[in-house]
RNA sequence: GCCGAAGUGGCGGAAUAGGCAGACGCGCACGACUCAAAAUCGUGUACCCUCGGGUAUGUGGGUUCGAUUCCCACCUUCGGCACCA
């Protein structure tokens, strides 16, 4: 029987029967898909592949389009890896502690636990409708006591190793959320959560000594395959800078003032010093001066935002103290200004206004001496600005006079060490990590304060310290967590002496639960350890970690730190120094108006709506087709319809060809093999948009070639699209007589002869301009190609304009004539 | 200011070990089917033009037979950091 092309058949009314019915597809095949090869198997002999997407915060509004996009990309990757025969761990869980749920509980009087379980159920149902092939049997939930037991356990280990300490320190305070914030949770002086301006407040806080690991966190990046911008962001955030500490004697006091500088070479140009208002010397010696007292009080009341607003308008006051410049022996004044930060270096600086713009601004404002000690190679007007560059020759600088700056820096350090007044040191922008939150909906910090024994960790046998039920979820005005009001929970006995003691009532920050969740996935129900070490050795490291750029500094740094800490404890395998091998950034989907989606813009796209209208497969394929996986893209429903049309044409082809006995023609075979090859190299590189395009192109090509394909070849194309369109592919696979589930099938093998064309079209250039094309044998010799090219009229007429000086032949690509 | 990424048709975007720019999709135009419309299918679609060509990948230079791709300078946009001594 003669095969009729589906292109021709499409003209008949019967086409309506082929209309792609995703609901039918879903109902029939969602179960098969769910069963197919999904579960990760511990210690399986196949090669393991750990594919991780950042777990979501299960909000009340359900899965948003960003989730759908990111998880779909991860899912395509994971499904493809399974078809390659890998043992894939593709887990999901819930990062469920956090303020939105607590705020909702406050507003509605409902228990956060109940709200969370409703939200996670919604999330999971939506994920299944999106065809996401997570291993739902390994779900972890940070609010589950059997999970946060280990979050607390990690904290106790930090305490035992001296990496967690309690300290009263000025912190960023959000008056609206009534919560202390880490530096990284303050965005341009505003609270990251609610956007209101923050102020500063002194509260006794648990602090984790992440700075101890600063160098490890930089060096460890070498063992990873993170994209460059992620590495750069982390290194930038840690902000390592090498310099020196120098001690200055204070006139008339038995005290020394220590400063940090990256430019010890400029010591001879230091004409004054500046202390942070919170510096201890200010507290001890300067407050009796009313002007100083007033300045310190006003700057202390300033929020970070206010301090930044006056960035170029420096303020300050003379402290009344004088110091001796150890290099020149001169007496120099000590000032106080809030442009000097207590939390960086030593909270005090030596000012070299000739060579530091901030010092220059300050000196100019208050009439202090500006003394150049570097001669720039070209002229410089020190009345206009400081000269901060490290190019020039030292002048007026005693022993290092005449040296180029680059040599003067180490020479100055050597001089300081010799004199016993300073030494080389390193400083970091990274601060220790404030770990206390005055909230209910977080992990209780498992510590007990005994009047006689001090802070004691809760014994491991008593973990987890469960969150008790409370009536009121509001934080207190004193800044304490609502837990402080539950006396029967707070009052306890000391684990060491048995005497009366009180529990810590603060809870942990959001990051605590997400620091180690990827370890728990390897062994989610282990009651005896955070995870079995052999299982960790089998599954770790995470091969690909897919997440948002907003987590490149904080989450990624915190979780790498915790992992390195666990590494030092021997909890994780000794041959795996870093938790994540590869880090991939996912893109952002903008609204149809090209603006960021937000309720106020009224441009929010809800994935469920599109799944209902166009189906899971079309929605998935469209999201992957929109653009590069890490790009910023605008939603366009019309384009989604175009993708749906493609799936409908694909189904039409499957239906017309399902019973075909006629073998596939060579050209169509070649098209299909080329498609499989292209798609198979795009998937592992997260180039899903070109994979979809190739599949579309292939379908168009088959149509142009008459549209007759034997199921053997058509099944290959169905396999190629299976990771993108799982439900559609499953049904098509059944129709075409495929065995089992398409998702459990092996990725099709490509015939290398079919993807390599024997004849190729090459371009002919004359003096760099395109003058024609030519079909040649792939392996043709230059001489024959040249001869054929010269015979073409549109080429030869340009060759006659002069003599051919040179002929360049790039095999199978181009032949280029140079005529003069 | 510093770090990072990116500038290509009306639109989303392809193509970089240098080799026919604009794959694929949207939109648009025309055609087929229809009483008509929708849907579907087909054809065309960077710009200019004297129909022989000419000009085009943010701008200006450079290297090369040949540059979206490499080098230099600059402009713009987006993301991150920012009084860090």
Image: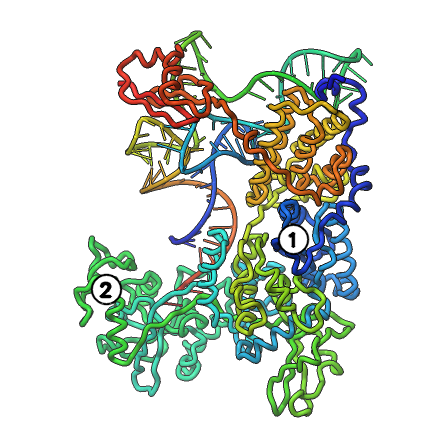
The numbered mark at residue A213 is none
Q: Which coloring applies here? A: rainbow
Q: Residue at x 76, y 49 (%)?
A: A35
Q: Position of residue A633 (x, y in %)?
A: 58, 40
Judging depth in this view, the residue of A212 and A415 nearest the camera is: A212
Judging depth in this view, the residue of A276 and A728 nearest the camera is: A728
Q: Quadrant of residue A175?
A: bottom right
Q: Is residue B53 above or below residue A544?
A: above
Subunit ID for the residue under disc 1: A
Q: Under tag 2, what secondary structure?
A: helix
Earlier along the polypeptide chain: callout 1 or callout 2?
1
Number of other residues with Cα within 10 Å of mark 1, as a class: few under 14, some 14 to 19, many 20 or more: many
Asked whether the beta carbons under mark 1 and mark 2 sit within 8 Å of each other, the answer is no
Q: Position of residue A660 (x, y in %)?
A: 75, 25
Q: Is residue A167 visible?
A: no
Q: Quadrant of residue B54?
A: top left
The numbered mark at residue A87 is 1
Q: Is residue A213 above or below residue A224?
A: below
Q: Position of residue B29 (x, y in %)?
A: 62, 16
Q: Residue lying farthest left?
A: A402
Q: Under tag 1, what secondary structure?
A: strand
Quarter of the picture containing the N terminus of chain A is top right
Q: Which residue is mark 2?
A: A407
Judging depth in this view, the residue of A368 and A58 nearest the camera is: A58
CA gap, disc 1 to disc 2?
Answer: 56 Å
Do circles 1 and 2 both sit on a common chain?
Answer: yes
Q: Is residue A218 left or right of residue A92?
A: left
How many marks on residues?
2
Subunit ID for the residue under disc 2: A
Q: Is residue A23 above or below residue A268?
A: above
Q: Residue at x 80, y 19 (%)?
A: A13
Q: Residue at x 52, y 62 (%)?
A: A578
């Amino acid at each position: 029987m003669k095969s009729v092309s589906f292109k021709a058949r499409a003209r008949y009314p019967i086409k309506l029967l082929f209309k792609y019915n995703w609901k039918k597809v879903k109902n029939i095949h969602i179960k098969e898909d769910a069963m197919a090869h999904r579960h990760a198997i511990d210690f399986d002999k196949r090669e393991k592949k750990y594919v991780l997407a950042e777990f979501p915060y299960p909000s009340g509004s359900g899965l948003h389009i960003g989730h759908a996009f990111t998880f779909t990309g991860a899912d395509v990757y994971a499904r493809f890896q399974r078809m390659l025969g890998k043992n894939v761990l593709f887990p999901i869980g819930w990062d469920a502690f956090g303020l939105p749920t607590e705020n909702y509980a406050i507003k509605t009087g409902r228990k956060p636990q109940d709200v969370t379980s409703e939200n996670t159920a919604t999330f999971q149902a939506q994920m299944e409708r999106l065809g996401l092939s997570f291993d739902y049997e390994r779900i972890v939930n940070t609010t589950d006591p059997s999970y946060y037991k280990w979050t607390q356990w990690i904290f106790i280990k930090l305490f035992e190793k001296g990496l967690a300490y309690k300290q009263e320190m000025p912190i960023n305070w959000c008056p609206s959320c009534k919560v202390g914030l880490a530096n990284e949770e303050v965005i341009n002086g505003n609270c990251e959560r609610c956007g209101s301006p923050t102020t500063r407040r002194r509260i006794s806080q648990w602090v984790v000594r992440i700075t101890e690991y600063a160098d490890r966190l930089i060096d460890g990046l070498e063992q990873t395959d993170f994209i460059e911008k992620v590495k750069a962001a982390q290194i930038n955030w840690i902000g390592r800078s090498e310099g020196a500490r120098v001690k200055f004697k204070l006139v008339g006091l038995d005290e020394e003032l220590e400063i940090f500088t990256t430019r010890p070479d400029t010591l001879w140009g230091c004409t004054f010093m500046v202390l942070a208002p919170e510096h201890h010397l200010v507290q001890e010696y300067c407050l009796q001066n009313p002007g100083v007292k007033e300045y310190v009080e006003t700057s202390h009341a300033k929020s970070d935002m206010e301090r930044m607003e006056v960035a170029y308008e420096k303020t300050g006051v003379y402290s009344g103290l004088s110091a001796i410049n150890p290099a020149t022996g001169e007496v120099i004044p000590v000032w106080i200004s809030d442009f000097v930060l207590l939390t960086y270096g030593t909270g005090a600086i030596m000012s070299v206004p000739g060579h530091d713009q901030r010092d220059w601004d300050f000196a100019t404002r208050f009439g202090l001496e500006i003394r150049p000690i570097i001669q720039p190679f070209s002229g410089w007007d020190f009345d206009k600005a400081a000269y901060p560059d490290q190019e020039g020759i030292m002048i007026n600088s005693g022993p290092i006079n005449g040296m180029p700056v680059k040599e003067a820096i180490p020479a100055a350090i050597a001089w300081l060490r010799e004199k016993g007044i300073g030494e080389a040191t390193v400083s970091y922008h990274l601060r220790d990590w404030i770990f206390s939150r005055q909230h209910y909906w977080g992990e209780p910090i498992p510590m007990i304060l005994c009047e006689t024994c001090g802070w004691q960790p809760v014994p491991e046998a008593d973990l987890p310290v469960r969150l008790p039920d409370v009536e009121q979820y509001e934080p207190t005005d004193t800044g304490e967590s609502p837990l402080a009001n539950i006396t029967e929970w707070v009052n306890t006995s000391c684990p060491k002496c048995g005497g009366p003691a009180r529990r810590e009532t603060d809870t942990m920050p959001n990051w605590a639960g997400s620091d180690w969740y990827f370890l728990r996935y390897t062994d989610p129900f282990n009651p005896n350890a955070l995870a079995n070490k052999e299982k960790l050795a089998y599954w770790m490291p995470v091969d690909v970690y897919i997440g948002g750029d907003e987590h490149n500094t904080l989450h990624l740094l915190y979780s790498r730190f915790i992992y390195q800490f666990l590494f030092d404890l021997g909890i994780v395998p000794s041959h795996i120094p870093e938790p994540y091998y590869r880090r991939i950034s996912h893109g952002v989907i903008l609204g149809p108006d090209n603006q960021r989606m937000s309720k106020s813009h009224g441009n929010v796209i809800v994935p469920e709506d599109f799944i209902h209208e166009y189906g899971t497969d079309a929605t998935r394929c469209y999201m992957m087709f929109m653009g590069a996986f890490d790009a910023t893209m605008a939603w366009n429903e019309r384009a989604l319809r175009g993708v749906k049309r493609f799936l409908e044409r694909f189904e039409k082809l499957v239906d017309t060809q399902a019973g075909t006995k006629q073998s596939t023609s060579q050209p169509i075979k070649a098209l299909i093999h080329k498609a499989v090859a292209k798609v198979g190299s795009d998937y592992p590189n997260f180039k899903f948009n070109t994979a979809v395009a190739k599949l579309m192109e292939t379908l168009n090509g088959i149509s142009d070639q008459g549209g007759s394909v034997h199921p053997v070849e058509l099944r290959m194309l169905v396999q190629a699209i299976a990771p993108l369109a799982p439900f559609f592919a499953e049904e098509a696979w059944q129709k075409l007589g495929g065995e089992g589930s398409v998702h459990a099938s092996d990725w099709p093998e490509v015939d290398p002869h079919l993807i390599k064309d024997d004849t190729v079209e090459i371009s002919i250039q004359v003096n760099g301009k395109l003058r024609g094309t030519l079909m040649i044998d792939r392996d043709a010799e230059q001489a024959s190609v040249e001869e054929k090219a010269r015979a073409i009229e549109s080429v030869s007429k340009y060759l006659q304009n002069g003599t051919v000086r040179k002929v360049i032949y790039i095999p199978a690509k181009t032949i280029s004539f140079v005529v003069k």
